Amino acid sequence: MAKSEMKKKPSFLHELFKTKKIAALGLCLLIFFLLVAVFADVIAPVKAVDGQIPTSVLEKLQPPSLKHPFGTDSVGRDLLSYMIYGCRTSVILGIVCTLLSTIVSLIIGVASAVIGGWFDLIVQRFVDAWQCVPGMLIMLIMMSILGNGLIQLIIVISIPAGIGGSRMVRSAAIAVKDSGYAKMSTMLGGGQLWKMIQHVTPNILPMIIMNLAGSLGGVIMMEASMNFLGFGVSVNTPSWGAMLSGQGRSNMYVAPWLAMVPGIAIAIMVFASAMLGDGVRDILDPRLKGGVGSYSGSKLKKIVEQKKQDLNMI
Amino acid sequence: MIDKKTDAYSLEIGVSDEVKELIDERIEQQPKVEKSARREILRVDNLKMYFPVTKGLFKRTVGYVKAVDDVSFRINQGETLGIVGESGSGKSTIGNCVMRNYKITGGHMMFDGLELESQTPKQMRSVHKKLTMVTQDPYASLDPRKTVSDIILEGPTIHKMYSSKGEARDIVGQMLELVGLNPKFAERFPHEFSGGQRQRISIARALALEPSFIVCDEIVSALDVSIQAQIVSLMMKVQQELGLTYIFIGHDLSVVRHISNQVAVMYLGKIMELTDSDELYNRPMHPYTQALISAAPIPNPTADRARERILLDGEVPSPINPPKGCNFCTRCRFADERCRQEEPEMIDVGNHHLVACHRVAGN
């Protein structure tokens, strides 16, 4: 039988590590944070009791030392242990919220664009109305209805963000659904759902991924401000945002490490996710392959040599 | 006149034995019909497609663009209807109406015993297995994020036409060979191909459905002349091998003549003349057709210079406000009072030759 020779596509991870080194670094950093979050009980020098770091008033506001590598805060908690436990809240919240909000905006935006007509009109007016009310107000109202807790906080942060983000998804999806190939899928007998999943979503994915990576930092800061207002996970549960906006801010001149350590940690995480997002987008979009900087100098020569050899073999 | 059969094969692309076997298989599946007793597969009666022209904040309808106005034709299985006309004459609209991309304003369309206009979107999905389309722009019609194999398998996947990965691979290999592409291209992306190759992929995607009817909407207009010839002869080869029926929309008279059994000449949403392609080119009756044919170049300079050239004055009138009477009366050199008042009927002047012109009717 005539067979099309399908050479195996290089696996996604393989390609990521080989061609997008910085993105791979981002992935490693995210995995590192995730591992820290999971094994917090094992790693932390000072173990938490009932989810809280033990305080000791005698050791308050100490600068970094061998005993306390990151120093201590105003109630004498070891900042390293606090950061390790805080990683749990921040990483889980950050990753889950960005994913959930993206999924929400993807479903609303794509369905609204592809189905169109009255459905689109009604959904979009609802989104408009939602956008008119200040986000923080909606979150506080939802929080006071649902009560404090991690799951509640995830829902409260991601759903409003998802509804807000759906407009951007919709505008991108409208451009794709009117393209020749999306129309063609109908003429081959594909339904609306087929069009949404097979054509519209993959073609707006690069934009979505970039957006997803960018919103991770915002989510962590949002958690910090919710914490600041007393609607966070719980007032005493460690989290990076809480440390940065609470103790870090009030003791900035006395103990700058209290603001610097969580600040740097948040920055690293945002950087890691942005770089990963960038790399993933490049790999997912075949048109961007071999862009600027991909082939240069020795690498280009190697590719040319390889091609020449291939030609000789034929 | 060149014999079409030999001509189609003179530009043939090499086809392997496997593909020939597949083709034989599929030809056997087709009901064998003599040319004289060919079955009518598509019948369009009084098709009307008016697009509303809206104005103001509340989208008041102030008028209609009569893109297709009262068009009727029939196509037999295994034959090709060519549709020619200027831009804006409603050629593509007819194709899109048949594909049910628009909600038609009026008329009836019967495809293979099914009343097309009354099919629900869900029913249309199964109709599209037999009735599909190849579009004009080979750059826009292929999803840039899918490989050639994904693109070709789109139809078969929707209609669950294969059960294993091996079968899917076979379909892709056969289709690529059928359209004259290397099966090795299966894992490439559309942006790696030229326009002609992309149009072949587009055709392979339509053929993978094993359809019986394809609407070819200006499939060669975006291509180079040399590639046009390849694609047209590919379409003719596939038609002979698989017994397909086409509507071939184009504005190049010689290309349409080459592929079509029947040709319809359209002007401002109406069919002006409809007859067998040779009859049309040898004995054009409608003044518009005569002008069109006189404008098409002949590849013989002496003959080209010697023949009479009919020049049309002015522009095509707006389809929002077509002239009263015959649509062509504003530019027709024979137009008289009757043409400006009365709309001509389609009349059969014999030899399956239908013309909508008072002058021809009067003779």
Image: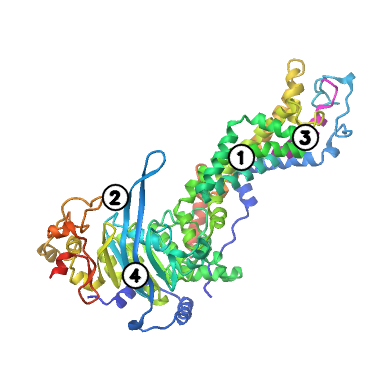
Q: Identify residue for label 1.
A: A163
The colour scheme used to paint the residues is: rainbow
Count residues near mark 3 (Cα–Cα under 10 Å), then give few for <14, some for 14-19, many for 20+: some
Count residues near mark 2 (Cα–Cα under 10 Å), then give few for <14, some for 14-19, many for 20+: some
Q: CA distance from mark 4 to mark 3?
A: 71 Å
Q: Nearer the viewer, mark 4 or mark 3?
A: 3
Q: What amino acid does circle 3 point to?
A: Gly
Q: Nearer the viewer, mark 4 or mark 1?
A: 1
> Quadrant location of residue A42?
top right
Residue A265 is situated, as x and y percent measured from the top left of the image, at 71, 31
Q: Identify residue for label 2.
A: B320
Helix, strand or loop at disc 1?
helix
> Quadrant location of residue A39?
top right
Residue at image position (32%, 51%) is: B65
Q: CA distance from mark 3 to mark 1?
A: 21 Å
Residue A147 is labelled as 3
Helix, strand or loop at disc 4?
helix
Q: Are marks 1 and 2 in contact (CB under 8 Å)?
A: no
Write down the region rendered in magenta. Answer: A74-94
Q: Quadrant of the N terminus of chain B?
A: bottom left
Residue at image position (67%, 43%) is: A100
Asked if residue A86 lies in the magenta stretch, the reply is yes
Nearest to the observer: residue A83 or residue A308 = A83
